[in-house]
Amino acid sequence: MRSWLLGLLLACAGAAAAPPAYEALPEAKALAVVPGDPATATGLVHSQPHELAASVLALEQCQRRAPAGRQCEVVRLNDRHITTGAEILARVPDGRHPLFLWRYQRGATVVYLAGSIHILKPSLYPLPAQLEAAFRSADYLVLEVDVTALADDDIQRRTLEYARLPDGQTLHDVLPQPLLQRLDRHLADFGLSSTMLQQVKPALVMNQVVVSRLLTLGYLPDSGVENHFIAQRRHQRVLELETIDRQLALLFGQPMPVQVQLLAETLDVEDEIEPILADMLVAWLSGDDAAFLELFKAQSGDSPEARAFLRQLLDERNDDMAEAVLGYLEGGPDGEPATYFVLVGAAHLVGERGIVALLAKKGIQGERIHSDDEIAGEER
């Protein structure tokens, strides 16, 4: 959650997109441009207190100057080139290729099962036409969790209920000193410190590091696939596959040694996450299940703790999600034929324990949608 783009921007990414004066500017600095037309509007900031501030301000500056309906993207952060949407799209096959979209049907009931990326660059839009058409044909939009049903302060309150450390315990108590020092070096890029996060568990700190890095690279939660379709929703009713409490309990209920290990492994790959993310998006847009799964595992860590957490995060939840899809095929909440657009993280769909494989083991075969397929049916 159309790749995330080439043409003129790719040709200029290292030259016109980064004027000679940029190299001499003091850090923290960032450059944002309008994809495909860097001469139309730019955002260039420097001498910022940290990388996140530079990136956010460059985007805001560019967006104020951009033509209506055009979205800017960050192309330089300090002296690093940030992979553009054009560069990702250029690696996606031009010819027929599979999408992260399957179609299941039983009688008059249809379930479209789609793989999402939760946080994306605006420059990766528009999405494939088949995804948009499947969504428009649906009566129900099915999400892992419908966060739009909750107020922001309620989500924050619930999160802290699960993610706050027990009274009398602090982050400095549970993290070894070498890890604390590493953590503070990373947090400094976002204007944060471990002292500012003393009351929360390592799992929440890990989440903060990941989200902050993605924001710094120009990946925005509002551009995630879920938010895109929620914003497009008209007649569709929203269903959810699980509760927010189940997700929070999974994320923040891990034993403390597991949380500490997962945080350490997150820091191990944090500096290299940009090319890994770009490769994952190429795999997602190309429908390359094996490459996507391999890259997802690579950025998730390879320790016994990380592998065990991944089994809980994916395999155990996939069983319930597959059962939910079966339930929709058998009549859904109203017992009447309907069309469902089920949107889950793309990693839930691939591999031997993915939802698609689990459904196949139950004798439920879906049709993989490809980039040149037409989605039948009219918008409801």
Image: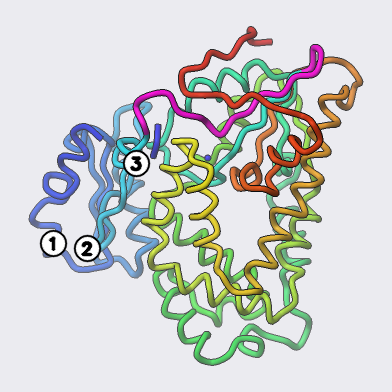
Residue span colored magenta: 93-109
Between 69 and 176, the one lying in front of the other is: 176
Residue at image x 71%, y 79%?
Answer: 256
Quadrant where the image shows the C terminus: top right
> Which residue is pictured at 79% across the width and 12% down the height?
108
Residue type pointed to by label 3: Ile
Specify the amino acid type for callout 1: Glu
Q: Which residue is mark 3?
A: 88
Which of the numbered marks, if any, corresponds to residue 23? 1
Task: Report the side of 211 relative to 339 (left or right).
Answer: left
Which amino acid does the dot numbered 2 rest on? Asp
360 lies left or right of 265: right
Q: Secondary structure at mark 1?
A: helix
Please tell me whether mark 2 sits on a helix, a strand or a loop. Answer: loop
Nearer to us: label 3 or label 1: 3
Residue 64 horizontal/vertical position (percent): 32, 39
Give the CA distance from mark 1 to mark 2.
7 Å
Q: Which residue is mark 2?
A: 79
Q: Judge whether residue 205 is colored magenta.
A: no
Residue 35 image offset from top left, x and y in percent: 28, 36
Labels 3, 2: front one: 3
Q: Nearer the viewer, residue 380 or 196?
A: 380
Q: CA distance from mark 3 to mark 2?
A: 20 Å
The crowding category of the residue bearing disc 1, from other C-alpha atoms within 10 Å (few below 14, some 14 to 19, many at least 20), is few
Q: Position of residue 121 (x, y in %)?
A: 42, 43
Image height of 86 relative to 26, above or below: above
Is 159 situated above or below 343?
A: below
Task: Specify the farthest residue to the top.
Answer: 378
102 magenta-colored: yes
